[in-house]
Image (spheres, grey):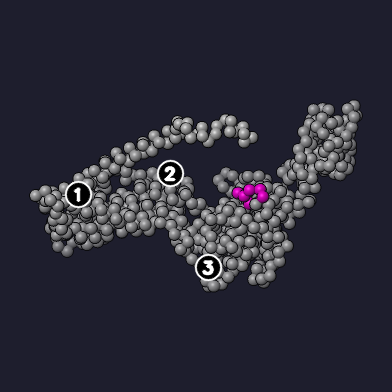
Amino acid sequence: MSSLPITTPLSESSFAVGSGATVEYRGVRRVFGAMSALDGLDLRIAPGELLALLGPSGCGKTTALRLLAGFDTPTEGDVLVDGQDVSHTPANKRDMGMVFQSYSLFPTMSATDNVAFGLRMRGQGTRDRRERAGELLELVGLAEHAKKYPHQLSGGQQQRVALARALAVRPRVLLLDEPLSALDAKVREQLRDEIRRIQLELGVTTVFVTHDQEEALSMADRVGVMRSGRLEQCDVPAVLYDRPATPFVAEFVGTMNHIPGRTEEGGRVRVLGQVLPGDAEGTAPPPGTAVDVLVRPEAVVVQAASADQGDAVVMVSTFRGSSVRMRLALRDGSEVLADVASHRAAELATGTHVSISLLDRPVLLAT
Amino acid sequence: MTAGLGDVAGPADLAVTPRRPSAAARRSRNGRYGRWLILTVAGIYFLGPLIAAIAFTLKDSQGGITFTAYRDIFTTSNGQTTLGGALVYSLLISAVTIVITLGLMLPTQLLVHLRLPGWRPFVETLTLLPLVFPPIVLVVGVSNVYAWAAPPTGAAAGTQESAIFHVLRFLREDSHPLLLALLYVILAMPFTYRALDSGIRAIDAQTLSEAARNLGAGWFTVLFRVLMPCLRTALVNAAFLCFALVMGEFTIAAILLYTRPFPVWLAQLPTTSGQVQAAISVFSLLLVEVILLVLGALNVRRPASRKE
């Protein structure tokens, strides 16, 4: 599979989608029988923004996307595009482009025919359709595969054609329903970069549903973390990672240590012999309450120490490229994960006694 | 290293040492024999009677070969129609049956598949009913409705005929046997439902239709431009089954006093010549086979020939 450099410029003005549309969910609920798939979703997506909806299976992220696509209607609330209520507009009248999780190319049509399908539905002439389809296939790096049929393309190529097909109609909003989940890791990474590059170049408002936090954090302008039909937090990736609003977000995005601690006066917490500013969800627990302190592995500072002065012992080290993740056994039997730079791995071999401390920054508390 | 290998077994050793076939090779050979045995038995079972029938039709009284029986089948009549007329009549019924079946079953099954999956067990059970009730029950039902709708026996001329009787009489007309086609649609339902169902399950109809809708296609376009091309094999299979059923169905047509459908025509031939009757059977068998082959050829996929 060919891969385009991220900096490839778009020379054709015809690619321009224009400024993307504003998307808004207003108090949207969707109930299936006794189950509430969406429970009062309020969300505004700015023009040209790429918003990722992230969450575990059954959290309502796909339902939110399908409501926007027009494949479903809300039980309550409104879905607005550029201020216009589209909640009951049929899917084929919404001017949106969607890439599906499963391969959704029409099997009896060539790549060109697939890309041109939406234009055909809009009554464009054969010549214009072919020209536009060619441009889009070139944009996704598949110009030389224009005459091939879906069964002659790899999974990654099929998803690129699907992306070209979705973009060919100059959609008001681009919808991506876990488009990379069926691909292998290498192709997934390549296509992730390409989708982001194309989205930035076209400036199309994009909603991207995924359960892969790495995908969401690396591609999106903002990430909305969902749980049980509700939006837990929606923010830029750095804030989501560094300052999760709830223990669920902290747990779901990245890896988190649960270290026992005890609250003190002034909203502070004592943990591993240190006193740090605490940040609890809702009402702060009274002083003296036993809490779980949530700490990222990279916020744990590890130093080699003698056997009598060490706080912990290195149990397992996992090489992760630029860093090594260590599983440390504390004296009380509990375990802590810590990330240290790879070049320090030699001095912190398995069985080494270490002292540990936490970076002096606010920590999230879970009771 | 090379020397070491030579010590173990040189080319000369291999040339003179007879090698026993491996167990895998023996199994493969036995499997091949087994396949030929099965094919031979099946061939004798299916082709034996046909070959015997052909031999019988070609034999003349002096022990030579004659095509008289095959010449006579085109002039033989049951008093109503000839072979050509009967075949055209049955082909017409087949075509109408196929059109009605596919026109009813495909949208229904897609609707159930895409929008009403909870209804699937009900529809599936419904389609099985023609297998549970024998065709005679269907005919008796139709006859009773016909009798109920008809004016009473001995009614005065000019008695008002009910609308339903008009409809039934129109359907029953010998010149356009819609009634037979409608009954055959019901008879074919268990088979066509399954042929179409397996085809629909084999494609991701939900995603394909949503992708097309998302790109601006209406339901008509989704059905005819997106789903039907993907279901071509299933559609042809369903058509096969309808065709085969119509070309062989005798009971309903005979009880409803139709004389022109091919199976009825065949059964009512006045000829006493066994050779002519056998020739007609052979001819009809080969004709149906040719038609099925033509339908099958239509089903060959030629995606590369499609152009934007």
> How far separated are the C-alphas under marks 2 and 1?
47 Å
Mark 1 vs mark 3: in front: 1
User: Circle 3: is it few (<14), some (14-19), or many (20+) Cα within 10 Å?
Assistant: many
> Closer to the camera, B160 or A356?
A356
Residue B215 shows in the view: no
Labels 3 and 2 touching (C-beta < 8 A)? no
Question: Would you identify the image quadrant in which residue B85 lies?
Answer: bottom left
Secondary structure of the residue carrying numbered label 2: helix
Q: Which residues are magenta?
A: A180-186
State the residue position of label 3: A120
Query: Residue B186's spot in the image, x, y percent?
Result: 32, 50
Q: Nearer the viewer, residue A99 or B114?
A: A99
Mark drawn on residue B42: none
Horizontally, residue B245 falls left or right of residue B210, namely left
Q: Nearer the viewer, residue B81 or A291?
A: B81
Q: Is residue B54 above or below residue B302?
A: above
Of tags 3 and 2, the one toward the viewer is: 3
The amino acid pointed to by label 1 is: Ile
Task: Give residue A22's position: percent from left, percent from top.
Answer: 68, 63
Q: Of the numbered discs in the image, which one, if any, rests on residue B54?
A: 1
Q: Residue at x 42, y 49 (%)?
A: B197
